[in-house]
Image (spheres, grey):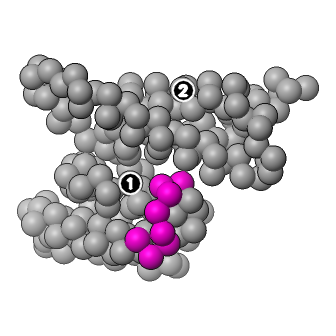
């Protein structure tokens, strides 16, 4: 029975965790490793979680902590060859902003400082609430709100500077358009 519950957990959360891993690492291979490591840790320690409704938050927090641990480790052993290859960008789902080339958004998002990119990814790509982002990143809700605001400004500026956007301007999506896009 425990094996089927674990499989259900993987089935329900793998894709979202993987997308979050890609947005953090900017690399599909590293994202896959982070996601697998997160489920491995769950297999070892997940039984200790008292409230099973918080499993998704636990998984995202664990993946984020693994990302930080790997980043710290790799910063100690940075090789010049790796630095030249680190121009891979994070991915976001196409359709997030109408009339905008997804590659430009991806490239722009990858240029944003990590402190702003991570909350943006969790909020817009994973539909996390401010509180959930706060818990996942272990920062106050006010800091989450500030980082989202500043991150959006950075992203908007980068996209405005892009010559391929619709006349250099971002076309905002209203909540009605966003709902229609997600259902149609």
The structure residue drawn at horizontal position 55% and vertical position 47%, both measured from the top left corner, is: 61
Q: Pointer 2 and pointer 1: residues touching (CB < 8 Å)?
A: no
Q: Which residue is mark 1?
A: 118
Residue 165 seen in this snapshot: no
Identified at 46% across, 63% down, the residue is 139
Magenta stretch holds residue 139: yes
Residue 96 picture location, percent across and down: 40, 61
Where in the figure is residue 141, as x and y percent of width and height? 49, 72
Q: Residues within 10 Å of mark 1 (few under 14, many from 20)?
A: many
Residue 101 highlighted magenta (yes or no): no
Q: Number of labelled discs?
A: 2
Residue 46 lies left or right of residue 3; in this view the side is left
- Residue 113, x across and y down, in percent: 24, 55
Q: Relative to 34, is 122 above or below? A: below
Query: Which residues lie in the magenta part?
Result: 136-143
Percent from the top left, x then y, of residue 109? 27, 54
Q: Dot 2 corresponds to which residue?
A: 37
| Quadrant occupied by the C terminus | bottom right
Residue sitting at x 76%, y 30%: 6
- Label located before the other in sequence (2 or 1): 2
Point 64% across, 46% down: residue: 58
Q: Name the one closer to the observer, 12 or 118.
A: 118
* Depth order, front residue of 182/43: 43
Q: Main secondary structure of the magenta part?
A: helix
Image position of 123 with respect to 41: above or below: below
- Secondary structure at badge 1 equals helix
């Amino acid at each position: 029975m425990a094996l089927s519950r674990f499989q259900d957990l993987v089935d329900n959360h793998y894709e979202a965790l993987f997308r979050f891993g890609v947005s953090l690492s900017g690399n599909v291979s590293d994202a896959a490793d982070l996601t697998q490591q997160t489920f491995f840790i769950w297999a070892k320690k997940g039984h200790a979680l008292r409230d099973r409704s918080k499993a998704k938050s636990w998984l995202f927090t664990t993946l984020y902590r693994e990302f930080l641990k790997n980043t710290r480790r790799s910063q100690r052993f940075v090789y010049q060859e790796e630095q030249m290859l680190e121009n891979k960008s994070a991915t976001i789902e196409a359709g997030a902003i109408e009339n905008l080339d997804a590659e430009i958004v991806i490239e722009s998002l990858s240029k944003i400082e990590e402190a702003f990119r991570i909350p943006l990814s969790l909020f817009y790509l994973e539909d996390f609430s401010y509180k959930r982002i706060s818990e996942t990143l272990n920062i106050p809700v006010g800091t989450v709100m500030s980082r989202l605001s500043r991150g959006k400004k950075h992203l908007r500026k980068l996209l405005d500077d892009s010559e391929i956007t619709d006349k250099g301007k971002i076309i905002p999506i209203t909540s009605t358009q966003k709902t229609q896009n997600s259902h149609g």
